[in-house]
Image (spheres, rainbow, N blue to C red):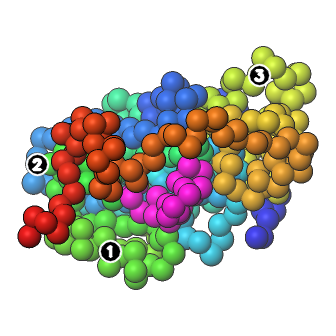
Amino acid sequence: MEGLDTADIEQETPVKDVFIAPSIHDEDILLGTSYTHHSPTPKTITENALIECVLGVDEAGRGPVLGWNTTVSRGLEKTWLIILGPMVYGLLYLPLASHRSLLAEAHHFDDSKVLTPAVRSSLMQTLCTPGTELYHNCGWATRVMSARDISAGMLKPAGTYNLNAQAMDATIELIKDVFAKGVNVTEIYIDTIGSPSVYQKKLERIFPTTMITVAKKADSLYPCVSAASVCAKVTRDAALEVCYRSYRLEEDLEAVVEGWGSGYPSDGRCTTWLKRNMDTFFGWGSECRFSWGTAKDLLETKASDFKIDWPTPENDEQAMRVTDFFVATTEDDEGESSELSSWFSRPVTEAMF
């Protein structure tokens, strides 16, 4: 898969002293737990329940091997592998009449790749500051998907819960939450996951009364998507900062200053950190996506001396299997199974007919 160039890496590297938004739940992040955060519904909307609103969704951190994936959703044509951190889905809504004038003209929300990390952090801080136009008019939400939960879904032994499906579910739940608040959303704009037409048709079946547009590069076309992208990216940047705190006491000063960079394997800071901080038995903490190839390769090469042999209990032959609860018992087993059969009943035999 194509790697990031130097300019892209810098754009994806969290800024120092990133704004810590209310969407940062330290305990959940450190435990590797996925969670959702909603801002208060803005006063402009609560005072007029019938006011028509526009809503945008975008994602941050789809590719990293380190960290969380924040959903504010990106197209797949230029998606890189990120091994560290969460994926975050971001959502923002506001009155339709203020869509472009407030977001694009007054505050210059734009394609997230045009905005520097420092500018994104500043915009997020303004959005969260009471008394500002953005705070008064805009509601927002994030779904922080931990690296642990992303990997668990993708490594399921039976039926992989792939990243597209996880992203789709996160987006749908965020939108449903806004409708549940009583917000009159009449237009929705989303940066695509895969085929725009397929994604849009699915959403239209779920939200049939709302005009929905799914498009590539939606964050450069629709200001509400641009703003949602900022919510997602700043939340992810701050989440990475929280993840990294647990390592600071163990690393030397040079390592702390260097950090783990953007979370992309093509970023030398990321791969250096992974190699230096890998436990040959357990790998890494909940900030790492074990399902990504980079992590798998490191585990297979650096942990090659460890082989796990799961012992079979001596009385394993006597142990009951799950399937034993679903088959008829013999007369010899009747006494032992009577208690279970009182819970689950007995199978129907031909004699019953």
Q: Nearer the viewer, residue 34 or 161?
A: 161
Q: Secondary structure at mark 1?
A: helix
| Residue 82 occupies quadrant | bottom right
- Can you tell which mark lies on residue 49? 2
Give the extent of the magenta segment.
Answer: 151-171
Rendered residue at 84%/51% (across/down): 300
The verdict on residue 319 being magenta is no
> In front: mark 2 or mark 3?
3
Q: Secondary structure at mark 2?
A: loop
- Can you tell which mark lies on residue 3? none
Give, as a three-letter code, the residue at label 2: Ala
Mark 2 and mark 1 in contact? Answer it, CB < 8 Å.
no
Which quadrant is home to the N terminus?
bottom right
Residue 301, percent from left and from top: 89, 51
- Residue topped by disc 1: 202
Residue 111, above or below 119: below
Q: Nearer the viewer, residue 49 or 75?
A: 75
Going from N to C along the chain, the mark reached first, 1 or 3, is 1
The reply to whether residue 341 is in sight is: yes
Residue at far bottom of view: 197
Give, as a three-letter code, the residue at label 3: Arg
Rendered residue at 39%/58% (across/down): 169
- Can you tell which mark lies on residue 248? 3
Residue 343, percent from left and from top: 20, 40
Q: Is residue 33 left or right of residue 258?
A: left
Going from N to C along the chain, the mark reached first, 2 or 1, is 2
Q: Nearer the viewer, residue 217 or 322?
A: 322
Q: Residues within 10 Å of mark 3 (few under 14, many from 20)?
A: some
Give, as a three-letter code, the residue at label 1: Lys
Question: How far apart, in angstroms, are the residues tagged by discs 2 and 3?
Answer: 48 Å
